[in-house]
Amino acid sequence: MKPTLKVGNTAEVTALVTEDMCPAFDGVVVHRVYSTWSMAHHMELAARKVLAPHLDEHEEGIGSHISIDHLAPTPVGRTVRVVAEAVEIDDSTVVCEICVYDGDRLVGRGRQIQRVLPKKKLQSLIQRSQR
């Protein structure tokens, strides 16, 4: 990783909550609100944006953990803002704390961990899993 990646680096994702982001089971929408799995997706994107600009050409990041507290519903039509901040960094790991807002209201928070590996090592792991 480049030395530009530091604790305190942040990145942000915004998303308009749409019908396809609602929780649905067996094709039936349960609630017309932002689903936890959509929140997880946006948290992963924000954390990736923290890491990606700081990877060396031979490196790649891979998610290894995410935890989420979904604190409040966000209705369809609202915009969420997802903010990730690097809070721990070592030679092969980046930990981000992430907050999700509907306006000024905190609707979610969590923690995401990415491992950084040489691209060749990651490709080897992926190929091995396909056997």
Image: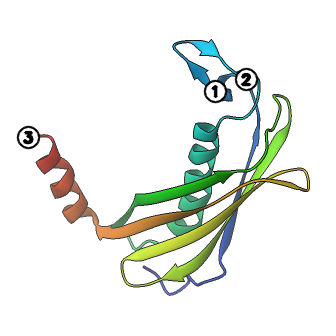
Q: Identify the mark nearer the N-term, 3 or 2.
A: 2
The answer to whether residue 31 is above or below residue 50 is above
- Residue 31's label in the rendered image is 2
Q: CA distance from mark 3 to mark 2?
A: 40 Å
* Marks 2 and 1 in Cβ contact (< 8 Å): yes
What residue is shown with label 1? 23
Total marks in image: 3
Residue 60 in the image: x percent, y percent? 36, 63
Secondary structure of residue under mark 1: loop
Amino acid type of the residue that numbered disc 1 sits on in the rendered structure: Pro
Quadrant of the rendered image containing residue 31? top right
Q: CA distance from mark 1 to mark 3?
A: 34 Å
Q: In the rendered view, does 22 fall on the left or right side of 127?
A: right
Q: Is residue 58 visible?
A: no
Other residues around mark 1 within 10 Å, as few (<14) / some (14–19) / many (≥20): some
Q: Nearer the viewer, mark 3 or mark 2?
A: 2
Q: Identify the mark nearer the N-term, 1 or 3.
A: 1
What residue is shown with label 3? 131
* Marks 1 and 3 in Cβ contact (< 8 Å): no
Amino acid type of the residue that numbered disc 2 sits on in the rendered structure: His
The residue furthest right is: 104
